[in-house]
Image: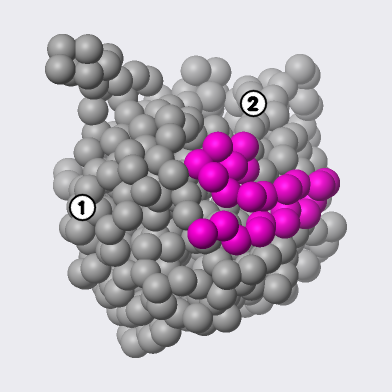
């Protein structure tokens, strides 16, 4: 529905309580992991997102039965009938490369095609492929068509990642759990989603130690069985709602969240003058009328400040009383939201990896367009804080990662609704 847009009447303070969705960035690797599990696997707390639906379609194409009811996905997997994923399905979900390790581990071969770069800049997969080769895979990459086989099966190995890549760590884990012998991943990513994936795999019979630390040890087992598992809460969705509250001088409480998993972001909100308080699965934020600037925010691998929160927190700091500085260290091209924030009245200057945000007294509603998932969420937050109406289009980006985002924000008191673009123009012309 490319013609839909969100109409946001900004200026009100957010308030109230909201239950946060399950994590997209965990649900996708978990669904890929279910390829390895014989029998039935049930995932609860699964967010209803276009990326999740795409992952379910990939599972179906591989020969699994997959159905989603409310927030539960049931995958029945007796036999993998097909080991290649069609191009159009791969294109639907950016992180579909995660199926490579799982399908290869289960069947000994996998073929998939990869879309080139993405809006965040080039998305290389060299670390994924190198790691799988260490485990015994023979891989060819011909114009983006990846063919991987394991002629004598996969075997354990010592894999040292040059950078703690989340995707490469996940793919290595998926391939290693049923490989022969022990695998050690060094310089592994430590993101909570890695811990979630390991917890799930261990419940299915895998033997993984150290997930969440830089050194992960995996003792290969012969096969995995299904289980019932609840997807972890979405830390970036949590940060999105907190940032919107901070931007509007609001007070909100989140439930089904894990505050310790986004400490680095909470510290920024505190520095900006918010009171934050996390307890068990709840997070509370009370924002002052205007935020203080934040000296320097540098995106880093976990437990550092997440790249996914950069745009979202930038939107909140546009009206801080002074200058904040961001440094994007993970992706090359992750400031696409800046032009539209400036169109709304922000004063942001980008130079290479650095963005300097000079606080302005006010933002103003405008017609803006999401260029990527988190950048789109940032524009929505700016719209909530701005005076007047914002029309935010290209919602397919936002729908990849947020379940009914307008319903969630309405629960916090926001004036926001989804509409067909043409319909609004018609109403305007008639009146
Ligand atoms: C990244 C984020 C993750 C976020 C996700 C979605 C980090 C470390 N990872 O995960 O938190 O949820 O985006 O936005 O912040 N790279 C290579 N070769 C590879 C793989 C990666 O050079 O084979 C580089 C990438 O270009 C990038 C960096 O490593 O600069 C991080 O990549 P990686 O963690 O793999 O990205 P995602 O798994 O997409």
- Looking at the figure, which quarter contains the C terminus? top left
Give how far across and how far down residue 226 sits, in percent: 34, 55
18 inside magenta stretch: no
Horizontal side of 392 relative to 211 (left or right) equals left
Up/down of 350 relative to 20, above or below: above
Q: Which residues are magenta?
A: 337-361
Q: Is residue 30 above or below residue 243?
A: above
Residue located 40% across and 73% down the image: 289
Could you say which is closer to the camera, residue 146 or residue 156?
A: 146
* Element carrying mark 1: helix
Q: Residue at x 37, y 69 (%)?
A: 249
Residue 294 visible somewhere in the drawing: yes
Q: Quadrant of residue 208?
A: bottom right
- Residue drawn where x is 73% and y is 48% of the image: 349
SS at circle 2? loop
1 vs 2, front mark: 1
Please identify the quadrant where the N terminus is shown: top left
Of 4 and 261, nearer the camera is 4
Specify the quadrant of the image occupied by residue 365: top left
Q: Residue at x 27, y 16 (%)?
A: 425
Q: Left or right: 367 with respect to 128?
A: left
Task: Examine the rendered structure and indicate whether residue 170 appears above or below residue 254.
Answer: above
Q: CB under 8 Å between callouts 1 and 2? A: no
What residue is pinned by disc 2?
A: 114
- The image position of residue 329, as x and y in percent, is 76, 56
Mark 1, residue position: 410
């Amino acid at each position: 529905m490319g013609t839909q847009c969100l109409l946001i009447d900004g200026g009100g303070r957010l308030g109230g309580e909201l239950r946060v969705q399950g994590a997209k960035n965990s649900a996708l690797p978990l669904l890929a992991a279910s390829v390895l599990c014989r029998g039935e696997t049930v995932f609860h707390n699964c967010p209803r997102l276009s990326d999740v639906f795409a992952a379910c379609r990939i599972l179906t194409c591989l020969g699994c039965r997959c159905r989603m009811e409310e927030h539960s996905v049931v995958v029945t997997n007796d036999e993998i009938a097909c080991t290649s994923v069609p191009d159009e399905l791969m294109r639907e979900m950016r992180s579909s490369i995660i199926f490579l390790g799982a399908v290869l581990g289960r069947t000994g071969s996998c073929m998939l095609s990869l879309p080139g770069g993405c809006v965040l800049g080039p998305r290389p997969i060299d670390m994924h492929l190198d790691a799988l080769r260490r485990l015994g895979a023979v891989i060819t990459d011909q114009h983006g068509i990846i063919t991987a086989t394991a002629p004598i099966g996969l075997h354990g190995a010592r894999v040292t990642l040059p950078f703690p890549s989340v995707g490469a760590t996940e793919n290595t884990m998926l391939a290693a759990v049923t490989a022969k012998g022990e695998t050690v991943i060094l310089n592994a990513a430590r993101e909570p989603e890695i811990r979630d994936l390991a917890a799930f795999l261990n419940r299915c019979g895998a033997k993984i130690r150290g997930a969440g630390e830089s050194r992960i040890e995996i003792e290969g087992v012969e096969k995995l069985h299904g289980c019932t598992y609840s997807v972890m809460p979405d830390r970036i969705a949590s940060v999105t709602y907190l940032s919107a509250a901070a931007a509007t001088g609001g007070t909100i409480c989140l439930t089904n969240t894990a505050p310790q998993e986004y400490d680095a972001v909470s510290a920024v909100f505190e520095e900006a003058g918010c009171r934050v308080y996390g307890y068990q699965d709840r997070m509370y934020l009370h924002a002052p009328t205007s935020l203080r600037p934040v000296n320097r925010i540098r995106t880093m691998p976990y437990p550092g400040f997440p790249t996914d929160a950069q745009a979202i927190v930038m939107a909140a700091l546009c009206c801080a009383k002074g200058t904040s500085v961001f440094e994007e260290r993970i992706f090359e091209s992750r400031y696409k939201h800046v032009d539209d924030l400036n169109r709304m009245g922000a004063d942001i200057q980008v130079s290479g990896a650095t963005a300097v945000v000079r606080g302005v007294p006010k933002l103003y509603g405008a017609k803006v367009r999401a260029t990527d998932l988190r950048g789109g969420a940032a524009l929505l937050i700016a719209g909530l804080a701005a005076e007047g109406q914002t029309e935010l289009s290209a919602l397919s980006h936002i729908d990849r990662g947020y379940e009914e985002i307008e319903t969630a924000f309405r629960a916090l008191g926001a004036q926001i609704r989804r509409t067909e673009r043409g319909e609004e123009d018609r109403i305007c012309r008639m009146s």
